[in-house]
Image (cartoon, rainbow, N blue to C red):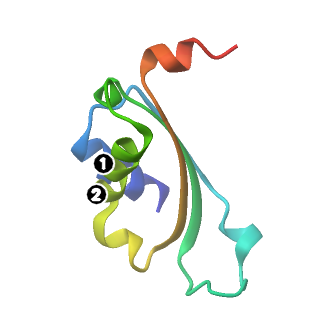
Amino acid sequence: MINLIKNKIKEQINISQIEIIDESAGHANHPGNSGGGHYKALIISNDFEGKNLVERHQIIYQALGELMTNEIHAFSMKTMTENEFKSID
């Protein structure tokens, strides 16, 4: 599933770096989980330049599309440009 998620995102934006962690095991059988996976992502792309946090997340959710209805129950992400990522100490 991680490769599918990466590919969906890469189809929509130019990625400098992408890391996705499957955290599903830690959330199995919790209330409200209909069976989809829990994922945490770091997505670095200069396509985020000039876009606020909401706009960045909208781009990613649009790229994931139908996966968000069943296959993905929760998707937490950190979206950054290359310069933002480089400035982290």
Q: Position of residue 8 (x, y in %)?
A: 30, 53
Q: Position of residue 12 (x, y in %)?
A: 23, 45
Q: Position of residue 9 (x, y in %)?
A: 33, 48
Element under disc 1: helix
User: Hey, which quadrant is residue 85 in on the image?
Assistant: top right
Q: Is residue 82 above or below residue 79?
A: above
Is residue 24 left or right of 69 when viewed as pictured?
A: right
Mark 2 touches mark 1? (CB < 8 Å): yes
The mark found on residue 62 in the picture is: 2
Residue at horizontal 57%, vertical 58%?
39
Residue at horizontal 53%, vertical 77%?
36
Element under disc 2: helix
Amino acid at pointer 1 = Ile
Q: Which residue is mark 1?
A: 59
**Mark 1 residue crowding within 10 angstroms, few (<14) / some (14–19) / many (20+):** some
Residue at horizontal 23%, vertical 46%?
11
**In which quadrant is the C terminus drawn?**
top right
User: Hey, which quadrant is residue 37 in on the image?
Assistant: bottom right
